[in-house]
């Protein structure tokens, strides 16, 4: 079992190398990149906005309900919301959700191309199919931090609206808390994490789609496996990066 | 001309190709026939470079495939046109985009030249009103014709077809067979067709390679296949009563 995992990791690393060899013509690649931006980034904005806004609100309400001691200032609601959203919710948990949304899309689309011999057709023509299929996704996901930036903004906005209009705190208190002890490096840390997660989101589902064998049933199974491994990798890298960037 | 020498290919402990040697001639339709599991598809995929044989040589007009550098292999592949069993059209592209794809990838031609060439090949395969349709919006026979158009648009030296008329009605199957034969003669290319359709053998089989259990069991022309006394070929080709009667009538003449 361990050998199988090591083999898969080795194969994944070889795939990463292959993606950057023999580039597709720029005139063709340009269109592929715009298509991937549309499929992966633009199409994800709606669900990211919806989840971020309401989870930000829930974080604010939960914090407020737990601040039962009158000596604890209400501005901590804004502080806790900001910290939770910027440090973990937006970069990590949105990425786990995107592992399901983007990941299953990537695996199933590449897997279907494998099943219907479209990848063989590319290879037979002399196209580097990995570069053609995966490279545009990696480039498109360089815009992923933009999605996470929107998630951060909407998460805090949701927290403010839930806190103020729910009667848990005043607007001034929330804003004071949201600005309190702000460490700019936390933003750098969050976006660095996001970029690593973007790379995982683009490549792990592609790996599972590209190397799948079988028919339609196996495409579904590959999508599930891709979601599991992308999520596991995100959580694992989140721990390692947090230790490296904030723990030392 | 494609020459193969002592090709061997295994999957795990199972040996699929057991030392096959033959020559596929230029300007002729070369057919590979045999029962399911005889190694036809593995042989075709080995020729295409999708499978790597453990031993033996594949020479494309003197170029030994296994001895080529990766860039040279990719260059050689641009000289190959392939018609897949399921057509393998890119389902996110229209018919016109599918056919234009090899030109966009491997030439520096401008849009007007590409359009002209695409229109020409689509007309050649008798598809003039499907340019903007997606593969899912056209019939199986039309998909095969688009696949042929895509395979020949870049003027290949070698054309490979995997079961080109499987799943098609008899009329469309004959149309596709004849189209492949005409294109082979017109462009003087080396065409290799993998089939188990006996109608194709009788219609367009200029050179026929019969595989049995991964071995070359027989080789010849369609005229020779009528007279052969090779029992394996007779059992396979004349398995239906109709073909048995056709053979008897042919031999009486």
Image (cartoon, coloured by chain):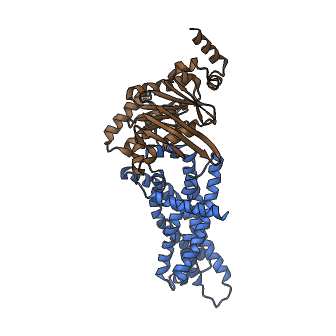
Chain colours: A blue, B brown
Quarter of the figure with residue A3: bottom right
Relative to residue A5, is residue B4 drawn left or right?
A: left
Q: Residue B170: give x, y in percent of width and height.
A: 57, 23
- Who is closer to the viewer here, B122 or B182? B182
Quarter of the figure with residue A101: bottom right
Q: Residue A174: give x, y in percent of width and height.
A: 55, 80
Q: Residue, x 62% and y 79% (percent of image)? A: A168
Q: Residue A35: give x, y in percent of width and height.
A: 45, 52
Relative to residue B249, is residue B184 drawn left or right?
A: left
Up-down relation of residue A191 to residue B193 (above or below): below
Q: Residue, x 60% and y 70% (percent of image)? A: A235
Q: Residue B171: give x, y in percent of width and height.
A: 54, 22
Relative to residue B115, is residue B6 drawn left or right?
A: right
* Label total for image: 0
- Who is closer to the viewer here, B166 or A58? B166
Look at the image and tell me in which quarter the C terminus of chain B lies.
top right
Up-down relation of residue A7 to residue B212 (above or below): below
Relative to residue A17, is residue B195 drawn left or right?
A: right
Q: Residue, x 64% and y 61% (percent of image)? A: A4
Residue B253 in view of the camera: yes
Residue A31 in view of the camera: no
Look at the image and tell me in which quarter the N terminus of chain B lies.
top left
- Who is closer to the viewer here, A128 or B247? B247
Residue farthest to the top? B253
- Who is closer to the viewer here, A229 or B197? B197
Up-down relation of residue A129 to residue B63 (above or below): below
Q: Residue, x 60% and y 30% (percent of image)? A: B34
């Amino acid at each position: 079992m361990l050998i199988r995992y090591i083999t898969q990791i080795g194969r994944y690393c070889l795939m990463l190398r292959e993606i950057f060899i023999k580039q597709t013509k720029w005139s063709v690649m340009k269109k592929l990149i715009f298509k991937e931006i549309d499929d992966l980034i633009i199409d994800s904005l709606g669900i990211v906005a919806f989840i971020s806004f309401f989870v930000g609100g829930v974080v604010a309400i939960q914090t407020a309900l737990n601040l039962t001691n009158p000596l604890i200032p209400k501005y901590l609601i804004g502080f806790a919301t900001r910290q939770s959203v910027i440090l973990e919710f937006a970069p990590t948990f949105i990425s786990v959700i995107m592992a399901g949304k983007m990941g299953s899309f990537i695996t199933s689309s590449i897997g279907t191309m494998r099943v219907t011999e479209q990848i063989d057709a590319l290879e037979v023509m002399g196209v580097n199919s990995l570069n053609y299929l995966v490279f545009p996704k990696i480039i498109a996901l360089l815009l992923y931090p933009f999605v996470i930036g929107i998630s951060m903004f909407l998460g805090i906005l949701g927290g403010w609206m839930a806190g103020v209009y729910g009667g848990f705190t005043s607007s001034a208190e929330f804003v004071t808390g949201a600005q309190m002890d702000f460490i700019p490096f936390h933003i750098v840390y969050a976006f660095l994490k996001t970029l690593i997660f973007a790379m995982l989101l683009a490549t792990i589902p592609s790996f599972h789609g590209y190397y799948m064998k079988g028919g339609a049933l196996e495409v579904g199974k590959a999508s599930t496996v891709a979601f599991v491994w992308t999520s596991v990798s995100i959580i694992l890298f989140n721990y390692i990066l947090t230790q490296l960037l904030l723990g030392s | 001309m494609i020459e193969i020498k002592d090709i061997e290919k295994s999957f795990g402990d199972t040996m699929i190709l057991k030392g096959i040697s033959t020559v596929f001639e230029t300007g002729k339709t070369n057919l590979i026939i045999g029962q399911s599991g005889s190694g036809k598809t593995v042989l075709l995929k080995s020729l295409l470079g999708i499978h790597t044989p453990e031993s033996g040589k594949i020479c494309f007009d003197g170029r030994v495939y296994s001895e080529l550098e990766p860039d040279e292999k990719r260059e050689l592949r641009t000289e190959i046109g392939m018609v897949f069993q399921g057509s393998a059209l890119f389902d996110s592209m229209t018919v016109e985009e599918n056919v234009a794809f090899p030109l966009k990838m491997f030439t520096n031609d401008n849009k007007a030249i590409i359009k002209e060439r695409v229109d020409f090949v689509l007309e050649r395969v008798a598809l003039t009103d499907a340019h903007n349709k997606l593969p899912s919006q056209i019939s199986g026979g039309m998909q095969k014709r688009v696949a042929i158009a895509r395979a020949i648009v870049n003027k290949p030296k070698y054309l490979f077809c995997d079961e080109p008329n499987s799943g098609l009605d008899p009329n469309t199957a004959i149309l596709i067979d004849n189209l492949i034969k005409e294109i082979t003669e017109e462009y003087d290319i080396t065409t290799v067709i993998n089939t188990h359709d006996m109608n194709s053998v009788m219609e367009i089989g200029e050179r026929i390679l019969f595989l049995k259990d991964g071995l070359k069991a027989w080789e010849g022309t369609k005229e020779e296949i009528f007279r052969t006394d090779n029992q394996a070929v007779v059992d396979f080709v004349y398995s239906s009563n109709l073909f048995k009667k056709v053979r008897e009538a042919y031999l009486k003449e």
